[in-house]
Amino acid sequence: MSTDARILAVVTEDMSLVGGGAPIFFARSPEERERIARYLARALDAMVHDLENGVYIIARH
Amino acid sequence: MDAHLGTIVAGVLAGTVSRVLTLYLDYRQYPGYPHGYITHLSLGFIASALGAVAVPAILEQDYTAVTFLALAAQQFREVRGMERKTLERLDENELVKRGSDYIEGIARTFEARNYLTMACAFFTSIAYQLGKTPAAVLMAALTLVFVRAFMAGESIGDICEVVPARIWFKGPVLMVEDISFINVGLPEVREKIAREGLAVLVKPANADARATVCDLGQRQAMAHTVALLLGTKKDVDLPELTPLARIDPETGTVGLFTVPLERDAEALVMAVKRTPVLESARARPLKAQAGRLAARR
C-alpha cells in the first residue's frame, strides 16, 4: 500500500480540460484515446484511470 | 561427563525434534528454501544443546555456565534479523508483496521458536535427571504437544466469516458488493476482471476481529496468501490485476478481489481463511472498557 501515487501522463480529447505538470497527449477520437492510454500504461508499468469526462490519467501506485 | 550424557542426549533429541516439527508447521509461510531449512535445523540443534547442557551445569554447581544462555539469546536475536533481511530482499521482487508486517511476524516467530526449542530441551533434560528415560519421554511428548498448540496461532477463519462476493463496475470503478476499489480505465481490462476475477467478503465476528482485519499489514497478508495459493494473472505491466483488500468503513467488512490463475471460489475462501492473524495486526479493543462501550451498539 504505497502512498506515493503519481500521475505520469494525461490523455485527453479536449485540451481545454487539462493543464499542469504531467505530459499531455491529445487524441482525436475515443478509440485513439484508449489506444494511447493502453500503450502508455504498458510502457510505464502503470494504471489507466478514467475520469469520465473524456480524460484518462496514467498513474503509478 | 558420562554421568550426564543421557541427560544431554535426551534434551538435544527432544529439542531438535521440536524444531523439526515447528519447521514443518511453517510450510505455508516458508516456501522451501533448502538452505533455510539447514540453517534453522542447525540453529535448532544448537539451541537444544544449550538448553540440555544447562541442567548438568547446574548439577555440577557450575552456576556461571548458565550465563551462556544469555549468549544464546543474543544469537537468536540475530536469527530474527537474518530472517527479516532475507525476506525483505525477496519481497522486493514479489509481484504481490508480503508486506513488512507479515515479514516482521515471520522473523519474530523464528526467534521465538528457538527459545521454545531451548525450553523443550531444558525440561526434557530435567525430567531425564529425575526419572530417567520414561520421565524424559513423557516430558518430551508434553512439551511437543505444547509447542504445536502454542505455535499454531490464529487464522482469519477463526475470527471472521468469509463468503464469496460479486464483482461489478460502477462506471469505471471496480466494486465488490458495496465496497469501491479502484478506477479501471480501459474497457478490455474491466471485461477481463469481470470475467476472470473472484472476490470475497471478510466479515469480522466482533470488534476485536474488526480492528484486526482493518490493519493494512493484515490485509496485505491476505492478498499475498491468495496470490501465493491461487496464483495471479498480474504482471509488472498489468497493475490493475493486483489483488487488493479494501474495507467498508461503515461495517468493518473487508472485501478482497483477485484475478487468480485458478478460478475457484471455494479455494479462494479457504486461502483467505488460512491466512495467519499477524501478531502486529492483532488488536483487542474489547479488553478495554472504552472498547467495550464503543462496541455496545
Image: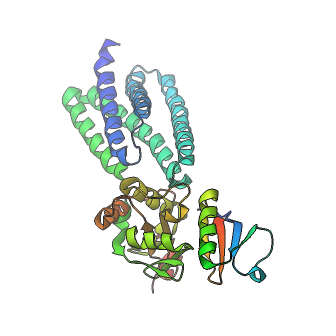
**Residue furthest to the front:** A28
Residue B43 appears left or right of A18? left
Residue sitting nearer the eye, B262 or A11:
A11
Residue B286 appears in the rendering: no
Q: Position of residue B178 (x, y in %)?
A: 46, 82
Whether B137 is drawn above or below B99: the answer is above
Q: Quadrant of the N terminus of chain B?
A: top left
Q: Position of residue B78 (x, y in %)?
A: 55, 35
Q: Residue A50, located in which quarter of the rendered image?
A: bottom right
At 37% from the left and 48% from the top, the residue drawn is B28
**Residue furthest to the left:** B134
Q: Position of residue B8 (x, y in %)?
A: 33, 23
Residue B39 appears in the rendering: yes
**Residue furthest to the bottom:** B297
Q: Position of residue B116 (x, y in %)?
A: 40, 40
At 62% from the left and 68% from the top, the residue drawn is A37
